[in-house]
Amino acid sequence: MNTAPTSAPRWVYLFGADRTDGDAGMKTLLGGKGANLAEMANLGLPVPPGFTISTDVCTAYYEAGRKLPESLTPQVDEALETIGRIVGTKFGDTDNPLLVSVRSGARASMPGMMDTILNLGLNDETVEGLVRRSGDRRFAYDSYRRFIQMYADIVLGVDHGVFEDILETFKNLNSMQLDTELTADDWLEIIESYKAAIADAIDRPFPQDTGEQLWGAISAVFGSWQNARAKTYRFLHGIPDDWGTAVNVQAMVFGNMGETSATGVAFTRNPSTGVKEIFGEFLVNAQGEDVVAGIRTPQHLTEAARIEAGSSQPSLEALTPGTFAELVAVFDKLETRYRDMQDIEFTIQDGKLWMLQTRSGKRTLEAALRIAVEMAEEGLISREEAVMRVNAADLDQLLHPTIDPDSEKNVLTNGLPASPGAAVGEIVFHAEDAEAAKAKGIDVILVRVETSPEDIHGMHAAAGILTARGGMTSHAAVVARGMGRPCVSGASALQIDARARTLKIGSTLLKEGDVITIDGSTGQVLHGRVKMRQPEMSGNFGTLMSWADEFRRLGVRANADTPRDAEQSRIFGADGIGLCRTEHMFFEADRILAMREMICAEDEEGRRAALDRILPMQRGDFEQLFETMAGLPITIRLLDPPLHEFLPHEGSELTSVAEALDISVEKLRARVRELSEFNPMLGFRGCRIAIRYPEITEMQARAVFEAAIAAGKKTGAPVKPEIMIPLVIYRREFDILADVIRGIAREVEAEHGVSLDYEIGTMVELPRCALKADEIAAGEEGAAFFSFGTNDLTQTCLGLSRDDGGPILQTYTSAGILEMDPFVSIDVSGVGELVQIGTERGRRVKPDLKIGICGEHAGDEASIRFFHEAGLDYVSCSPYRLPVARLAAAQAALREKGVG
Ligand code: ADP
Ligand code: MG
Ligand code: MG
């Protein structure tokens, strides 16, 4: 029989070898690290040769129940030979062994989440080959012990603490401080102890077969895709579980070959501030993660940074100007190619530069804004792209306080300004305690010697992070910047006793629960609660927002009830007020009595007398609001809450209110009883009150119109109020109240000899209103605008109370019924459909019907995208969410155009 050979799928892609198979566009297949290594090789940069085992293998591995495909073996063997040939070595060869790193690399970068093994290919024999080839025993044994330690930890599951203990004990016995003090023979001794400890732990010797080592490592990387750390990270960052990781196998280059070797990390711009300057650190005679692990204090790359930090350790710029210049050229090339700030790993082996990684770097919001704006100004990216580069929800951070420079400060110590912003909280020493406190609503500062990936959940829960060790690129610093948590790192004066839960700084002894303030912008650690200051919108933030405004179609208004809210909303760039609730105008101390009088009055005459006293106060409020908004549109909603909210319920208060109202306590109590409801949310509220007591609407309409005339005169900007009727479900309700309003308008017009420009619309907050939208909007006299009240619309569509639904939502989230809290991000398929129906039916009868939304959802990024796509005219959110909404609206519009 003659069967044609079936060709196995291609699993392996070379880079930096005779050829490079991948490029930056192949992240899905090669993972981010692999695709970018290939791209750097394509750019002609010095990349140690290697190959990527694709994410398809990860999928196949899990599909086969954690088994690698057989056809992978020959492909890996061939690729190994190729890279061995290029570097003049052979894998497993005792004289001249090829050593490789085995590196994970998912599609989205997951720093610190997946494990990397260095120096693989060493055993008791090949290490002697390395000794001979390098002529450096110390280097060879140092490499071997690193390999044993990493391999045992990651692949064999031996706790890394075992190795740290052995090394610490050795150093203590020999009065040594730094790893660099150990000699070749010292390392040899350590290696023997390591191997003994491993044999002890796993009941078999450390694997000497380099093939077994390699396949063990490859399987471990694929296996680590499902480890707890990686899962947590994916969960927190919304990375799908089925993406999988690639594995990169790459010829080793050595930063630990003595004084002319080094390893370093760098950013092409400052990831904290965004300033266009080289930012990074390196360590001489070190390997891999040494720089970020906080083992020794790293040196600065540039002279400027060294001088600023007051360090006596030479910078790379001063130490090896040639290599430094080469690095700068590489940075330029990479930024031009990627059109974004790059986060770079490099190694210098005996004076020669090697590039090991590049990716778009994580950055603080401040840096993101600056980099986006400056790159657009440099012409590297377009303004549209700049607007897409900043995560809208992150802007929320800018609306957080910073330390008031005039406040009284008791500075305990200084660390590095690792992630900007200030935070106040109670001290906790363990990630679990941070989570527990967060659950109770307590703000905490997580204080650690240094952080590791196991601490991520606690860092997330903390208001701020403080560490005793580690530089600007330490784990704590990188992760905190990514999360937008303020962080002070490397505050070496901290004496932390995590077990006793105490922290000593100089002579001050603090314990768990004591309050401190940290300032991640300056590095200060302060005693107690320090005064904070509110932020403003200026600089790059302001510039980017003005660009966003050019691109958005959706209007962005504010929910503002008071002149103060209105002022804040103007500062944050509102196009108008989309919801002014009038109830607070009745609640204030000087008016609540009149309101109560109105509610308890025997007859219409009594009610009118009380309303007459409220009228001037309400008119005054509206006048101020109109003046502040100077001609911008304002939607005013008529009285909405149930009347019993205005009455007292407690015994003692009943007595004093009855006295003030000059009625008997019995009578007041009877009225309270009469108005009380089992389910106020579905009760006597909104337009239902106005239908029963139209004189309330008359008074409110008069206050609005008279204020509009007065404010218009004062500012010269004509005011066009939009009067909104709440809780409408029948056209007839709307007609009755619209007639009342129009009647008052005619009266006011006659009294003042002016003609009023105004609109009457309705809130859409009950499903029936959305369904009957065409009826309610039809004709000249129908609703001129809609505003979806998505809080109530969600409650009534889902039949779920926002106030009592918490436990149900929690159950439903853990049962996998709900992904998102529907009160935070709109339920697109359910409530969203009501929005679509209401919009479509309303516009069918009135094509120019103005439609907005004024629920909490108006400040939520995902919801805003939906409202944009649903064709709404504007969203109206809390003043403090305005920047988020403006940017999210622009991004929704740009995404539709295919930008970013
Ligand atoms: P991570 O994704 O956690 O950054 P990496 O795969 O980038 O892990 O590797 C960890 C460390 O090892 C990095 O500092 C990297 O530069 C270094 N490294 C990886 N491969 C090599 C190699 N072939 N030669 C020298 N150093 C390497
Ligand atoms: Mg890396
Ligand atoms: Mg409502």
Image (spheres, helix red, strand yellow):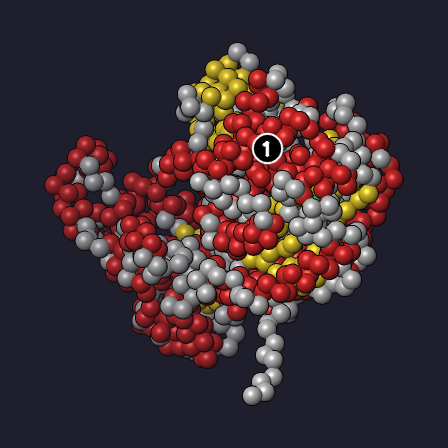
Q: Is residue 313 above or below residue 4?
A: above
Image quarter (top left, top right, bottom left or bottom right) of the N terminus: bottom right
Residue 695, position in %: x, y? 31, 57
Residue 616, position in %: x, y? 41, 46
Amino acid type, residue under disc 1 in the picture: Ile
Q: Which residue is mark 1?
A: 191
Disc 1 packing (10 Å; few <14; some 14–19; many ≥20): many
Residue drawn at (56%, 38%) of the image: 149
In this rendering, does residue 430 appear at all? Answer: yes
Q: Is residue 409 above or below residue 859?
A: above
- Element type where label 1 sits in the image: helix
Residue drawn at (45%, 35%) of the image: 200
Residue drawn at (70%, 36%) of the image: 140
Farthest residue to the left: give it: 666
Image quarter (top left, top right, bottom left or bottom right) of the C terminus: bottom right
Residue drawn at (75%, 23%) of the image: 310
Farthest residue to the right: give it: 322
Query: Quadrant of residue 617 in the image?
Result: top left
